[in-house]
Amino acid sequence: KQWYQRRVAITAGDYKQMVTEFVIKSLYLQRQDTDPEAEKYREYLQNKETFNANRRRQLFKKKEGYEERKQKLDYSNFSYNKRTCVVGIPSKKHPEKCGCNRDINDKVHKEFRMEEEHHGTWDFRKHTELEPSDAYGRVSFGSNQRAKYVRVDAETERLALFDLLTSTFKLPTPGVVISVTGSTLGFTVSSKIEKVIQRGLIKAAITTNGWITTCGYDSGHVKIIGDALRTNNGAVPCIGFSAWGCIPDVAKEALTINANNKRGVPHCKYPKNEIIPGSHQENLESNHSHFVLVDQGGVIAWGSESYLRNRIESYIRDAMNIPVVQVVLQGGNTTAQQLELSLKSGTPA
C-alpha cells in the first residue's frame, strides 16, 4: 500500500478494489480447468493491468521537471568556442607566472616572450587561441539537483548566447532579469535580512516570469539565493555566469567531454571536493538551473565573467526591450567593477 501510494497516489477505495482484484486473480490463476468465465476474467485482468501500468507512467510524467528533463539538448549546430593561452608572458609581480596565472613553462604555451618590454602585457584577445568548446550538457549535483551548462569564449556574440539560452537550453523569454552581485567572501547578514532577501527575490522573479543571474559560486551571497531556490523547488530559472578558470581542476575534468568520456547526451556528475583556503577557486552552487562558464584562457580569473554577463544583460534590455535591474549585496573590488559596468550600460541598481 505504501509503495503504491508513493508511486500512484491512489485513494483508499482504489486500493480496496486493487486488493480484491489481486485476490480474485490469484484464485483464478490457480484453477487448472478451462472455465470460459475464468478465461474471460483472466483477459479482463490483463487489460486492467495494462491500464494501470499506463496510468502509473502518466502520473509519473506529471511530476515537476519531468518534461524538462526529457527534452534532449540539440547540439547539432553547436558552434561555441573556448580559449587556451598559447603565448607565455611573465607577470610583473610574479615573473615565474604567465599573465594567465599558469606557470611560465606550462605545456600549453607554444611560445615565450621573456623580454622586459613584454612583462605584464598579457591580453587574452591577443595571446590565446580559439578552439571548439568541449564542455557542455547537463550536470548533476545530487538527487534532484541538475543544471545545464556550457563553456564559452568571453567574446561570444550576444545574440548567439541569447539563442543558446532560449533555443538550446529551452529557457522561456523572461519578463524581467534580476541581476544579483555582491560579496562571495565574508558575507554576513542577520537571519531577518536574509529571509527578506530570499522572499523578495523569489517573489519578484515568479510574479514577473523573470530570470535571476548571479556569479554562480557556492559562497557568500549566492548561497542565500541557492537556499531560496531550493525551498521553491527550482520554480525560477537562475543562471550562473562563472569564470571557467575559477572552478576546481577536478570539476573541469568532470565537465569536459574527452576521448575517454564520450556521452550521447552530455551528462556528468559534479565531483564533491573541498576548496583549499587561499586557492582562489570556488565550487558551483548546486541549486542553479543553468551555468555559462566564461573562458578567457586563464586560471584564477576572478571577475573575467563580468564583461560577458553585462553584455548579455544589456542585449536583453536594449534589443528585447525587457527590464533589467541589478541588486547589490555587499561586495568588494569585483562587485564594484560589475556595478560600474551595469551603471555605464544603463542598468539601474
Image (tube, rainbow, N blue to C red):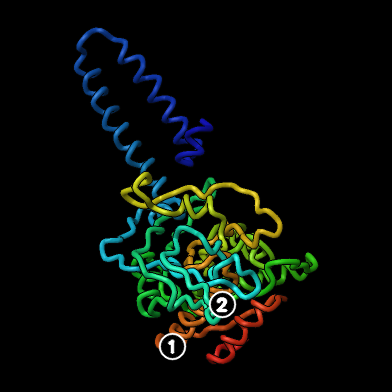
The image quarter containing residue 135 is: bottom left
Task: Indicate the amino acid at tag 1.
Answer: Asn
Task: Indicate the amino acid at tag 2.
Answer: His
Residue 34: x %, y % from top left = 20, 11
Task: Specify which label sits upstream in the sequence, 2 or 1.
Answer: 2
**Dot 2 surroundings within 10 Å: few (below 14), some, or many (20 or more)?**
some
Q: Considering the numbered disc 2 on the image, is that residue within a helix, a strand or a loop?
A: loop
**Dot 2 corresponds to which residue?**
119
Viewer can see residue 32? yes
Task: State the residue lying farthest toward the right.
Answer: 190
Residue 39: x %, y % from top left = 22, 19
Q: Considering the numbered disc 1 on the image, is that residue within a helix, a strand or a loop?
A: loop
Q: Residue at x 49, y 81 (%)?
A: 313
The image quarter containing residue 229 is: bottom right
Foreground residue, 2 or 25?
Answer: 2
Foreground residue, 190 or 16?
Answer: 190
* 262 left or right of 175 in image: left
**Dot 1 corresponds to which residue?**
321
The C terminus lies in which quarter of the figure?
bottom right
Q: Residue at x 49, y 78 (%)?
A: 123
Q: Relative to 336, say whether 98 is above or below.
A: above
Return the mark for residue 240. none
**Dot 1 surroundings within 10 Å: few (below 14), some, or many (20 or more)?**
few
Q: Residue at x 45, y 64 (%)?
A: 109
Foreground residue, 279 or 310?
Answer: 279
The image quarter containing residue 51 is: top left
Q: Residue at x 53, y 50 (%)?
A: 250
Q: Are marks 2 and 1 in contact (CB under 8 Å)?
A: no
Q: Relative to 38, say whether 210 is above or below.
A: below
Residue 172: x %, y % from top left = 41, 71
